Image: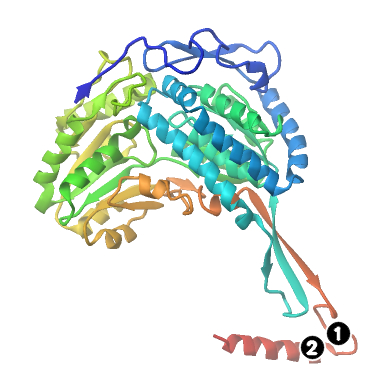
Amino acid sequence: MTSTTEPGTTPAGTGHKLGAPGDLFHLPDLVTCGPGRPAQVSHSPLDGSLVGAVPVCTPDDVAAAVESARAAQREWAAVPLRERRAVVGRFHALLLQREAEILDLVQAESGKSRLNAFEELADAALTAAYYRRTAGRFLRPARRTGAAPGLTRTAEYRIPKGVVGIISPWNYPLTLAVSDAIPALLAGNACVLKPDSQTPFTALLALELLREAGLPRDLFQIVTGDGPTLGPALISGVDFLMFTGSSETGRIVAQQCAERLIGFSGELGGKNATLVLADADLDKAARGAAQGCFSNSGQLCISMERIYVHGAVFEDFLATFTAHVEAIRLGSGPGWDIDMGSLTGQRQLDRVSTHVEDARAKGARVITGGRPRPDLGPYFYEPTILTGVTGEMVVAREETFGPVVAVYQVEDNDEAVALANDSHYGLNASVWSARHGRDAGRRLLAGTVNINDGYSAAWASHDAPMGGMKDSGVGRRHGKEGILKYTEAQTVAQQRLVPVGPPPGMTNQRYTRLVKGALTLMGRLR
């Protein structure tokens, strides 16, 4: 694969030198914390340069953030929806106006390529545009059939939950913070966000833009610091929690939410499968698989880690796929000619290396890649293709969350579907076929399935729900589910003329006969 890098480069366009703590932001205005908190320093995975420092918040800081957010939420819920939509519209415009600054910061914090950083910005803007346009339709009161037609007037209303807690990960620090906050805010809620400790500044910039767009100051709060310390404190105060992260942590978070009987939605891990059927366009499938496996250096919950290829085209696909993977350009810096950036830190590099070396030691074949690239930066790793992966290898079952994919040969479509479904995970899947893609896709146990695409087609279809089956999650983001989950359904039924029950002067026996007759008639209706 081609390599290019600009070591030591300070991202351009921020108007700041990424160096001194607090240089990017006036932190007391953006992080909810008490005085005298210790600082947590953040370094760029690209070259180890200092990005800045944020305060290490305490559980008391979290409680204060929730309390002030709750007070602001009561006023926000009374704000007409058109005014809430106007704030989101201005935020959408600011995202596009300040593109260079946002991309520089996302790259500096996460180590991803410029293109992958832009995908975050585009998704955040698309989310804002979608929910600004559709919130009124999803949230408006709806007439429902009453107990006694003509006598009972029944309506369903949507009431905001109150304060929504959001715990967002490091791999997509902009879109996974903003994409969940936007519908929650439009639905009339307040938000308290705990970003990952590796990537706090992107979330802070998003908050700065939201306030510039007119969002009330206390309505959206950010707390920074240690997740195991702040997470339980957040859950103990909010009315709903949105979590994106590993399945293991998701179980812990769900249990804590259950103790308080508050709602929980989580997009969790994945070991996503691609199916290449015998009638696939192999060049398109190979090119799409390379994008689906190695975008964001494979650090993507919906990226592909397993590929099942029909035996009739296995050798041709593998050769074409290898050629596309070896053409991937690795590097850092703001250049648009870079395809894949760095892993986010030492923990990810260790996990990727361990999975590959375990597979190699147990007999798997490394077709291409399979080694770190310290010449490019501390956490770079080559995009890697494995064959001969067997069940005793850790890479066969566990989520790698890095630039590694195992390619398997199968006899037919049924075997491909069965092997793809043989996993505890069920987040995303991809099928490449000219004629049989939809049939195979409908048989896959995954929350989203892409036909002749890796993951973008389903993810970017914001009008459709996105989430996982099995160990890959609970609840959905996007579509109407992505905003209605932040509300409580309230039924208001107004009875007119006569009450539901025996009217004055009618015996109970006469009343029950009339009701039974009506029920009999209803049972015969089609």
Q: Nearer the viewer, residue 459 or 126?
A: 126
- Quarter of the image for the N terminus: give it: top left
The residue indicated by pointer 1 is 503
Residue lying farthest top? 20
Residue 493, horizontal then vertical, whole percent: 76, 68
Tell whether label 1 touches label 2 (CB within 8 Å).
Answer: yes
Between the residue at mark 2 and the residue at mark 1, the CA separation in whole angstroms equals 8 Å
Q: Earlier in the sequence, mark 2 or mark 1?
A: 1
Residue located farthest toward the right when viewing the structure as drawn: 505
Q: On the picture, is 159 further left or further right than 410?
A: right
For the C terminus, give its image quadrant: bottom right
Tell me the mark number nearer the camera, choosing from 2 and 1.
Answer: 1
| Residue type, label 2 | Tyr
The residue tagged 2 is 511
Vertical side of 60 occupied by 464: above or below: below
Q: Position of residue 409 (x, y in %)?
A: 15, 48
Where does the image place residue 464, in percent across and percent down from the top left?
Answer: 46, 54
